[in-house]
Image (cartoon, rainbow, N blue to C red):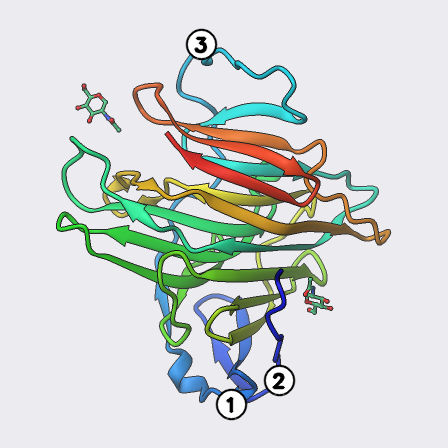
Amino acid sequence: MWSFVCEFLVASLVAWSAAAELSFVAEGSQRGKKVDIKELDFQAIPPRRHWQEGSRSRSHPHVKDASKRADISYSGNWCGASQHSTSADQIVNAFSYFTAPDLQLRPGIPGAQYAAAWVGIDGAACKSALLQAGVTTVVNTNGGQSASAWWQWYPEASYSIKGLPVKPGEWMTVNITATSATSGKVIITNAQQGYSVAITVSNGPKLCRVDAEWIVEDFYDAKGQVAFASFSDVWFVDAAATTVKGKNIGIDGAAMVHLQNENGTVVCEAEAYDNSNFVLTSK
Ligand SMILES: *[C@@H]1O[C@H](CO)[C@@H](O)[C@H](O)[C@H]1NC(C)=O
Ligand SMILES: *[C@@H]1O[C@H](CO)[C@@H](O)[C@H](O)[C@H]1NC(C)=O
């Protein structure tokens, strides 16, 4: 079913340098054809908090389906699956196909509304760093949407990748490898349009490599937490987390994280289908 041809040809290689010590090189292609590095057009955005927050509500909603195969937890900003490994068998890779969020306005909430979907390593149990990449979609008050791809080694800046086009609902992949606690490789593709961007990063903030996660986030911008939109189901497909010992631990046993807004209402639920596929539903 997922028979997109992967054409990860190395097209160009140019050094990029961010503030502080973090540095990266990037290469891009579309259907095997070189993308000029300048056309990738990385734009730094100041970091905002991304750690998984606990629930704001003291009483959790009653969980109806006791047969759900994974633990359920509640968060004030994350919805999705969070898998944990031990420092004895650290996570080296997190991968998934997912759909770029396709949004609808939530009635009664003023202004533009948002959701970000991403794959990452750390940021749940480990609070020193989070290496992540994904897509943020905004729906404006007139219902029009735009989506943009980005990567971030939090708490360093986020980089939007203007040269990687994405429309709401399109199938993306993110493939994140932690080659060490402070170096990694992020490959983000638009599987439908055949674009691939690979970013090799050095001197990142220290990862613990104990969590892998696949998340839709009600994130923060300069003014605080953004208004969280309604969305069409977001599927994570072929989700995998590989450990140092070469095991794919998938999402079996992961915490399925549901998002509760500031008023304690559950606005997003995550439900596992099997060890590598799950769906997020807007409530
Ligand atoms: C992820 O990228 C690495 C190279 O960094 C590659 O070896 C691996 O096969 C990729 N995984 C998937 C599922 O494509
Ligand atoms: C929470 O409730 C307040 C008061 O009813 C309301 O103004 C606000 O919009 C609600 N927040 C959300 C995210 O629904």
Q: Nearer the viewer, residue 168 or 116?
A: 168
Q: From mark 1 to mark 2, how far is it between C-alphas? A: 8 Å
Which numbered dot is residue 59? 3
Which numbered dot is residue 107? none
Amino acid type assigned to the residue bearing label 2 in the image: Leu
- Can residue 223 be seen here? The reply is yes
Q: Residue at x 48, y 38 (%)?
A: 280
Q: Residue at x 38, y 71 (%)?
A: 165
* Mark closer to the chain start, 3 or 2: 2
Residue that numbered label 2 is attached to: 9
Q: Nearer the viewer, residue 107 or 183?
A: 107
Q: Residue at x 52, y 89 (%)?
A: 33
- The reply to whether the C-beta atoms of the residues labelled 1 and 2 are less than 8 Å apart is yes
Amino acid type assigned to the residue bearing label 3 in the image: Ser
Q: Quadrant of residue 36?
A: bottom left
Mark 3 element type? loop
- The reply to whether the C-beta atoms of the residues labelled 3 and 2 are less than 8 Å apart is no
* Mark closer to the chain start, 1 or 2: 2
